[in-house]
Image: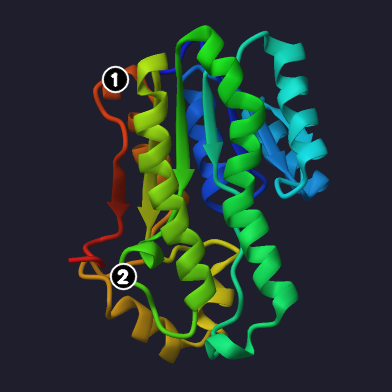
Amino acid sequence: MRLQGKTAIVTGAGSGFGAGIARRFAAEGARVMLADINAAAAEAAASECGGRAQVVDVSRDASVAEMAAAAMAAWGQIDILVNNAGITHLPQPMEEVSEAEFDRILAVNAKSVYLTARHIVPLMKAARRGAILNVASTAGVSPRPRLSWYNASKGWMITATKSMAVELAPFGVRVNAINPVAGETPLLKSFMGQDTPEIRAKFLATIPLGRFSTPEDMANAALYLCSDEASMVTGVAMEVDGGRCI
């Protein structure tokens, strides 16, 4: 029960890594808000772990403000924030990605971190405690070709993590990131372009441990970084990637 008495918001928690993180946090004693743009997915995941479902569009200021207000109304405190919501574009030459796709990727993967900071960081500063975890990607460290703007958005998130960590340290707020490798989530097919045995084999060949990541892998890393066990850890972008970035 390493998160006993703590509260946590996990965005993009309706499926994939976010759902896995939320489940683990709840199992470790946290009161968890599972926030997702897909209301049905959020409700299903929340009922599975006993959490609170919240519909949110992390790219919209008013929606993020509503999420933060709902958490404060329910709990009176926000101890942990996991910025997990993210999207990608299909693999293609960088110049062929549409402007609308580019804008959406930056809004969901980057602007969302700014918006949650606007509404939740002041609460953590006032409490003089808190842990923020940004779910970045190995793409921000070792980019794959034909995913350029997704790669760039995750590189932005890693830099933002380090900058936030330095600025918020005097207030007792820690900020870290995890860098997953491709995993069995709804985004996997988008990363690969299409899901075939040949393309899967090509992806797996780049991961020394020889398997895709799982929501449980991310949940284990997230639990450590958001718990008091990591009280001296801030500004880290931890690779949870089976050796992919070596």
Residue 70's x, y, as percent?
Answer: 77, 22
Say the numbered circle drawn on residue 106: none
Q: Could you say which is closer to the camera, residue 4 or residue 119? A: 119
Does residue 43 appear in this view?
A: no
Left or right? Give the position of 90 relative to 177. Answer: right
Q: Residue furthest left?
A: 246
Question: Which residue type does callout 1 highlight?
Answer: Ser
- The residue at which mark 2 appears reads as 142
Say the numbered circle drawn on residue 231: 1
N-terminal of the two: label 1 or label 2?
Answer: 2
Q: Quadrant of residue 230?
A: top left
Residue 26's x, y, as percent?
Answer: 54, 25
- Residue 30 higher or lower than 146, as above or below: above
Q: Could you say which is closer to the camera, residue 160 or residue 83? A: 160
The residue positioned 42% from the left and 81% from the top of the image is 200
Element carrying mark 2: loop
The residue positioned 37% from the left and 32% from the top of the image is 165
Left or right? Give the position of 144 relative to 45. Answer: left
The residues bearing labels 1 and 2 have C-alpha atoms spaced at a distance of 28 Å
**Disc 1 and disc 2 in contact, CB within 8 angstroms:** no
Residue 137's x, y, as percent?
Answer: 41, 59
Q: Could you say which is closer to the camera, residue 231 or residue 61? A: 61
Number of callouts? 2
